[in-house]
Amino acid sequence: MNDPIRAQSLTVLDFDISKEPVPTDPAANPFRLVVDPVMRVRLRRALFELIESHDQELARYVAEGSLALDSYKEYIELFAHSLKQTMSSREGVAYLLQACGFEVNKDDINLQPDTRWKVQR
């Protein structure tokens, strides 16, 4: 099988996640999204750490020989499935809440929150 994606090498990318909040002007946002910039940075950092954790676990399984991957496509599919499972669990949402500074009982986490759009047409 001649898979052009498999022939590519992996490149390590360095991401600098600053501990400082990104200065934003909510009024400058075309959607007028008004969310605390510090909270957005915390959430972004927590998501990045979660992604890194999943990536390391998949890499460990492959290195141990307990997981076989045939392509980058398959890796991305497994990676996405793993993240989906985590984020659809109370433990996954609790991790994000704790990383953002909240202590919430796992039984109080709503896995099916309502989206209350305020759109007038």
Image (spheres, rainbow, N blue to C red):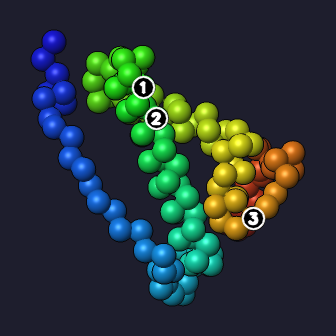
State which quadrant residue 4 falls in.
Answer: top left
Label disc, if present, on residue 27 of the rendered structure: none
Residue that carries the numbered disc 2 in the rendered image:
57
Residue density around tag 2, few if under 14, some if 14–19, many if 20 or more, within 10 Å: few
Marks 2/1 in contact by CB < 8 Å: the verdict is yes
Disc 2 residue type (three-letter):
Glu
Q: Is 41 placed above or below 26 here?
A: above
Could you say where residue 90 lies in the image, as x and y percent from the top left?
74, 42
Q: Earlier in the sequence, mark 2 or mark 3?
A: 2
Please name the residue shown 41% across and 68% down the image: 17
Could you say where residue 11 lies in the image, as x and y percent from the top left?
20, 47
Residue that carries the numbered disc 3 in the rendered image:
102
Label disc, if present, on residue 61 of the rendered structure: 1
Q: Horizontal placement of 5 versus 121: left or right?
A: left
Q: Is 44 placed above or below 24 here?
A: above
Marks 2/3 in contact by CB < 8 Å: the verdict is no
Query: Looking at the rendering, in which quadrant would you find the C terminus?
Result: bottom right
Q: Nearer the viewer, mark 3 or mark 1?
A: 1
Q: Horizontal placement of 118 versus 76: left or right?
A: right
Disc 1 residue type (three-letter):
Tyr
Please name the residue shown 57% across and 37% down the image: 84
State which quadrant residue 40 falls in.
Answer: bottom right
